[in-house]
Image: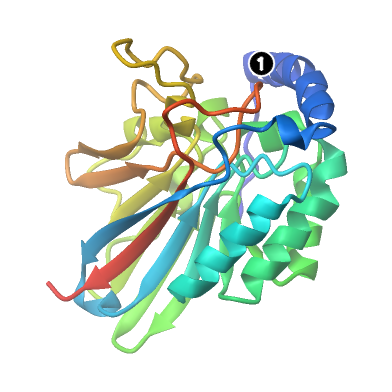
Amino acid sequence: MSRRVTVSWPDRARSCIGHSLSEPLYRAFSLVPQWEWGLSDPEVSILTQRHPLLAGRRAIHLTDLHLDRYLPRHERIVTTVRERRPDWIFLTGDLLNVPEGLPHLFRFLEQLRAIAPVYMTLGNHDHYSGVPVSQYAELADRHKITLLVNQSAYVSLDRGELAIVGVDDPSLHRADLRCVPPRAASRVTVLLAHAPNILESVGEHHAIDLILCGHSHGGQWRVPGIPTFWLPPGCNGRIAGWYESGRHRLYVNRGLGWSFLPFRLNCRPEIAVIEWMEE
C-alpha cells in the first residue's frame, strides 16, 4: 500500500531550481540528437547473486533513461534486453526530463513490457519534469507496467516469493521504507531506489537482499588522473558498482542517458544483468 509523503519546502525549492536549470537544456539538445556522443554503446554487466529461491532466474536493471526522444540507440537497447531473455525488468528512475517525452518514454517501455514484466520507480528528474505522479501511474497502468512509489509487489516462486519494493526518490527525501515487508524465510526482497543515499536510510531490521540504484551516471565525464568531479546530490560519493553497509549490498548502475550535456566521456552507459544461482 502506498503512503503519502510530505515534501518539505527545501525539497520543493530544489525541485523548482532543478527543473528551471535542466528544462531548457533538455529541450534544446533533444532537437539535435546527432550531437549525442558516447551514449550508443552500452556495456552489459553481469551481476551474479546467490539464492536458492531464485536460482536460474534473471533480471535486467536499467536506469537514468532521460528519454525525451526515441532514438535508434533505444531500439538497440531493446534488442540487447530481448537477447538476454530476462524474467523481470527493473527501472530505477529518471525516466524522462520534460512532459513531451511521455509518448517516447512509453513507446520504449511498451517494447520492454513485451519482453518481460516491468517494475519501475521514479527519480528526481521525473519530479522536475512537472508530470504528476498520478499521470505516471495512469500511463503505467494502461501499459501494464508496475510503477512502485513507496510500494511493494510480490511474485510467486516455486518455493516462496520475490518481493519487489520501489521507493520514491531518496535524493529528494521522498523514500518511505515502511513499504519494505518483514523478514520471511521463503521471501527474497529486491529494493529499487533511484539514488544511492538510500543506503543511509536502511537499517539492520530491513530484510533486503539486494538494492539497485542509479542517479550517478557513473560520473558521466571521467578525465584520466582527475577524481570524479560531477556527482549529483544523493550519491554520497558512490559512483558506480558495489557498495555495502552492514548486511546490505547496493549496486549503482551508470545508467543509459545524459544529464545537462549530451555526452559521456570515458563512462559507457550500462545495462546490468542480474543472474541468480544456487547458494
Q: Position of residue 146 (x, y in %)?
A: 63, 65
Image quadrant in which the N terminus is located: bottom right
Taking the view exactly as shown, the residue that stands out farthest to the left is 279
Identify the residue shown where x is 39% and y is 16%: 223
Please tell me which residue is depicted at 54% across the width and 53% down the height of the picture: 91
Q: Residue furthest front?
A: 34
Q: Is residue 47 visible?
A: yes
Residue 208 in view here: no
Amino acid at dot 1: Arg
30 sits left or right of 85 in the view: right
Q: Is residue 109 above or below residue 195?
A: below
Count neighbours of disc 1 (C-alpha within 10 A) and say few if under 14, some if 14 to 19, many if 20 or more: some
Along the horizontal axis of the image, is 173 left or right of 163?
right
Specify whether 215 is left or right of 197.
Answer: right
- Asked if 60 appears above or below 58 in the picture, the reply is above
Q: Residue 193, position in %: x, y?
A: 48, 44
Rendered location of residue 154, percent (x, y): 47, 72
Quadrant of the frame with the C terminus = bottom left
Question: Residue at (31%, 54%) from the top-left corner?
Answer: 210
Query: Would you identify the image quadrant in which residue 35 lies?
Result: top right
Q: Is residue 139 left or right of residue 6?
A: right
Image x and y of residue 88, in percent: 48, 70
- The coloring applied to the image is rainbow
Foreground residue among 106 and 247? 106
Mark 1 element type: helix
| Residue bearing the label numbered 1 | 14
Check the image and report above or below for 133 versus 72. above
* Extreme residue in the bottom direction: 158
The residue located at (52%, 66%) in the rendering is: 81
Instruction: Please tell me which residue lies in front, 253 or 126.
Output: 253
Examine the image and state in which quarter residue 147 appears: bottom right
